[in-house]
Image: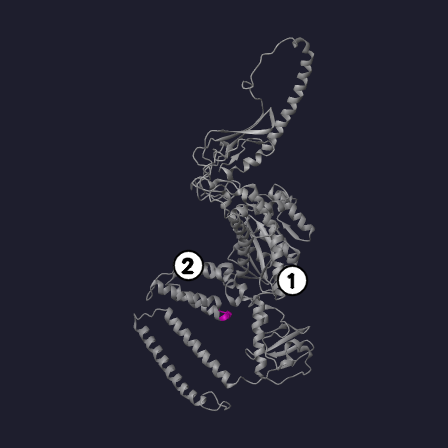
Amino acid sequence: MSNQHLTPTNVQNPIVISPTAEQQRLTKCGVNVYKERIAKQPEVTGECWVYKDKYTLNKKHEQINNRKRKALQSDTVDNESDQLHASDTEDTEEPVVSSENKKRVILWKIRFQCHRKARSEKKKVEVVDDENDEYDEDGMKRRPIQKKSKNIGCKAQLMVYCYEDDEDNVEFTYVNNHDGHVPGSIGDVQYLRKSKELNDRILEELHKGYHVRDIKRFLQREYQHVAKSSRFGHINTVDVYNILCKYREELCCLDKDDFKSVKKQLEAFQSMQYHVWIDVTDNENPSERLTSKDFAFGFVAPWQLAYFEKAQFVSLDATHDVSKYKDGVLYTMVIRDPVAGRGVPITYLLTNDLSSKPLLGWFRSLATIGLNPQRFTIDNSLPEDNAIVQVWPSCSIQHCIWHVMRAWMQNVQAKIHGSIGRTPTQAKAHIRPRLKELMYEKNTEQFHVLLNNFLTEFQDSQCEFITYFKTYYVDKWDGRAYERWNCSYQPQVFHAMSTNNYVESWHNQLKTIYLKRKRTHRLDVLINLLADDVSFDITEEVNRLSANVGRMGSTERRLRANEIKAEEEQRSRHPSSLIHLSDSEYSVVSFNNNAHNAVGANNNQVASCTCPDYQRHFFPFRPQITNHRVWDQETTVSNISSSTSHHIDHPQPPTNKDQLQTAINRLVSRATALKRRLNKSAITSNNNNNNNNITNIIQQIDALTQNISNVDSDLDAVLSLPPNSNFQLQ
């Protein structure tokens, strides 16, 4: 693209765009091009002229044309009357008037004003004194801190005249000088608007499908030779994003009113086999429910409905600031795709009602189309909890352990104080591991023992924290609040689903990638974005991960790790067990813990298994990918159904070398844990009991050290034997 017409003259003065700006001002041009000439003045002289009237410029010209037609009709009538009296004036001589004294007749005129003119009284914005009031009376987000207004009361004007003796051209007259600013200066360029040519250039690149930042970078390089005092020399991301928003609105807005457009889009979704829900009462029109003060609606795409059968473990969360309406939130349900190993949104709800009422209606609507989850992972949200209990009473509820732990740590910092024998820092360091032990204990009976000991130990010394802990995490929900955060009460599947990481990550992608961290969005634009761009990207990404094209996903990486283990086990030629129970059932011994696992095969694939790995992921293994020990290359799980032997030798116990290696690793692990705990803790010796305990611990460590020295001597004797010698672990 050529930019020769954009390049101003060489900048000699660093303040003004050109020293000859006065000579480049408009004087005269054709009547058909004067608008374009005025629009290009910011790049020529730095002056920006705007038309401010109750009529648009096009309507103004319509008025002018109507006036000209009426004038022509009146001239015709006057000519006829002049002909009737021609005989009376033939002998009368008219006075001779010179051309200089003739006054030119103006056909029409238009006044343009400097763009930094004072704002009219009707359009003045009231200044908000209360900075805490973030929304106006219409529920729109305020921006209390803004740049200075460009309206400073400049009185400069540009008059456009069209005369009767030269109807094909217009002449320009400048009225008043610019006041309060210097057109074409560096300080004035920030108030110039983008040219129509730049807007068209941005729109052209958007049609090609490029991203906002890519377009900004490309245009910056294209216009880098333009002077910095020109608006073309300062292209930022917001310039491109504003055009993108207008482009989206042109595609998505079916009506000028946002909620009428939403209603039309939801009706179109229903014709496309979407499941649509609008929160309305009996005999209530949906259009009456969809207003800026009260709205609640949700939808499910056909490709999302296919996930409902396997949606046993669901993450639910809400995110704010996705639209321009006060209290507007987007609820999303996310599940883990069993093939791709990533979070996938399966339904959306948009509302500004933060109570449980819209959630209750939405959940009941989803239950009618087959959603019956086994567990919900949510934040510690009372409306979400109440709605889930009423619709799915048998469903387990897991409070996100990350949010729970964060709340605990914040209250530990605020409510834990020093006690007898401990400073505040030591008391906090002492209680933190006890809280983590409570959360991750997987045995129910042991958990209750730990809980009672915890409450008893700190009831007197840390009364404030224990009161908080019992109120919100023990006594709540009829005294069973601990079931929502302790691991022993939750199904041990999908360790990532114990937190809301999947849905939090999805909301972060939505706001960062699709909404560009902006919240001035209409609801119809957001709906179209979710139903079009997001759906396309997610389905394509899932298909790519399923085909294992490109980088491996989390599931593929885990399966590949198991495949490597299985290949190493096959090469080691260790005997193992494979028992053929029926045509599709087998018993296989795991090489991890020598446990017998029941395996179900379907189409030469492992379709089910009782091993912990399958119970956590519910994913059918691909051929030749398993974490089970196999006999040899011909009896892998990929062709397990073709095995003819019903019983293969029982596995031999692990070798002495394996047992020795395991024992040493266990010893090192425990020693490392003791050292880490000692480094993180503080030892106080204010009483004799602590001194006696420390002395006993030192004696035990010395005894262990002596035993290790004895083992080292015995190990020297063992290692001196030939490689094939058999020995018993001393």
> On the image, numbered disc 1 is attached to which residue?
309
Give the position of the C terminus as an image quadrant.
bottom left
Classify residue 593 by image quadrant: bottom right
Using a 10 Å C-alpha cutoff, classify the residue at mark 1 as few (fewer than 14 neighbours), some (14 to 19) or many (20 or more). few
- Most foreground residue, 498 or 53: 53
Q: As drawn, is 40 to the left or to the right of 645?
A: left
Q: Residue flagged by tag 1: what amino acid is it?
A: Glu
Q: Nearer the viewer, residue 649 or 32?
A: 32
Compared with 358, 188 (above or below) is above
Which residues fall within the magenta stretch? 441-445
Asked whether 442 falls inside the magenta stretch, the response is: yes
**Is residue 125 in view from this perspective?**
yes
* Mark 1 secondary-structure assignment: helix
The image position of residue 675, as x and y in percent, is 39, 73
- Expressed as whole percent of the image width and height from the top left, the position of residue 188 reads 45, 39
Dominant secondary structure (helix, strand or loop) of the stretch shown in magenta? loop
**Label 2 with label 1: CB-CB less than 8 Å:** no
Residue 232 image point, x, y percent: 51, 44
What amino acid type should be assigned to the residue bearing mark 2? Asn
Q: Is residue 44 above or below residue 586?
A: above
Residue 411: numbered disc? 2
Q: Earlier in the sequence, mark 2 or mark 1?
A: 1
> Is residue 590 shown to the viewer in this render?
no
Q: Residue 193: x, y in percent?
A: 52, 40
Determine whether the residue tagged by mark 2 lies in a helix, strand or loop: helix
Tell me where residue 178 sits by quadrant.
top left
Q: Quadrant of residue 370?
A: bottom right
For disc 2, the neighbor class at 10 Å (few under 14, some 14 to 19, many from 20) is some
Q: Check residue 509 in the rendering and tell me which mark sits there, or answer none.
A: none
Residue 133 is covered by the magenta coloring: no
**From the viewer's perspective, is residue 481 above or below residue 84?**
below
